[in-house]
Amino acid sequence: MKRFLLLLALAAYPACSVAAEAVKGGACCSTMDKACECLTRGPVSALDETWHARTDLSATWGRVPPRLKDHDNRRSYGLYSLNTIQPLVRSDDMHNTLLGHVGFGFQGGRGNVMAGLGYRHLTASTDHMFGLGANYSYMNLRHVRYRGPGAYIEWLSKYTTLTLSRFWNRWRVSEDAWKSYLKSNSRGNTTHLDLTFQFPYLPWAQIMIGKTWIGDKVGRRSFQSNYRGASLARLDYGLRLNLLGCLALEGGTLGTGSNNYLRLVVSFGRPAVNEYALCDGCLGGEAFSARDLKNYTLAPVLRHSRVDTRTMIN
């Protein structure tokens, strides 16, 4: 999957070069411009952002790790979800925001839901923003169900986002399929530390690096045993590309390298958090372009604001 992420990043460069040359020479890349005019309206500020722009449809495809595979070795999954994040109370200067988010997912006729609350405070200098929140998720996947609360704290700067999150889940597993792996009813918890920052000179591309700690034993296998050691191969890696203002592509590998996923996100408008997109221009003027944190007061919280399987398959 790491090779896939590298190829994905490299594949974007031809389009970047064309866009950069067109802008530099004053020419118009008609095909790309027309597509952008139809699907985006350029960067949107937090004040101009609409409620439906903060709502999206997403599709996630991936593979679960060996410790959760069933007796047929069918380790692939597909999950489709509708997610939204909205302000409940927000000050006029946008320095204090109480937000709510909810998501509904579907997989093979089974329903999933995630809902939560959060609070963010933007400092007077607008150089830093701090947040905290909690959520509750219920996931009903093939042969396994899990549910439970989660909590997080975060720190956003003009260049990076650092999130520390924790989930406490209760599992219920089909004994016919996985009785040798997991108990029918078990408890487990996961802790995640995630860092997000821009790809150098590509402000529309974000790199995600994380670490997961899985506690408690479930059945005869210890989750923790799969994550011992300090090898960089045991980290979570991801790459998000804002291709258009309303379209993003994300891919990554989690933990040991066998937990790969690909995610497509389509918004009903351009959210302010998509401050940079490929169709706006490929290359940034400097290695890391500063972002306006007011546009991130309602940014989705990694692992907490969208229905996906990353909290389970790690």
Image: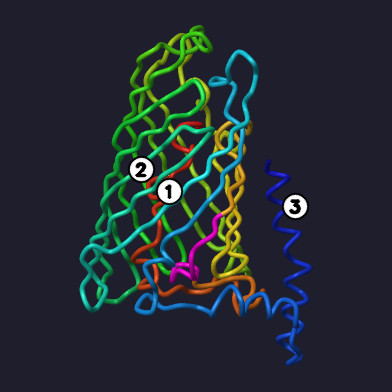
Majority secondary structure of magenta residues:
loop
Q: Secondary structure at mark 2?
A: strand
Q: Which residues are magenta?
A: 265-274
Task: Using the numbered discs, state the Cα–Cα distance from disc 1 to disc 3 in whole angstroms.
Answer: 26 Å
Q: Is residue 314 above or below residue 4?
A: above
The stretch drawn in magenta includes residue 273: yes
Q: Amino acid at mark 2?
A: Met
How crowded pointer 2 is (Cα within 10 Å; few <14, some 14-19, many 20+) is rated as: many
Q: Provide the residue designation for mark 3.
A: 7
Q: Is residue 139 above or below residue 185?
A: below
Task: Using the numbered discs, state the Cα–Cα distance from disc 2 to disc 3 in whole angstroms.
Answer: 33 Å
Q: Provide the residue designation for mark 2.
A: 114
Q: Please state which of residues 77 and 119 is positioned toward the viewer in this rendering.
A: 77
Q: Amino acid at mark 1?
A: Arg
**For residue 203, what is the image quadrant?**
bottom right
Residue contact between numbered discs 2 and 1, judged by CB atoms under 8 Å: yes
Q: Left of 125 or right of it: where is 244?
A: right
Residue 306 numbered tag:
1
Q: Please state which of residues 312 and 100 is positioned toward the viewer in this rendering.
A: 100
- Tell me the quarter of the image containing the N terminus: top right
Q: Amino acid at mark 3?
A: Leu
Which tag, 2 or 3, sits closer to the chain's start?
3
Q: Left of 71 or right of it: where is 158?
A: left
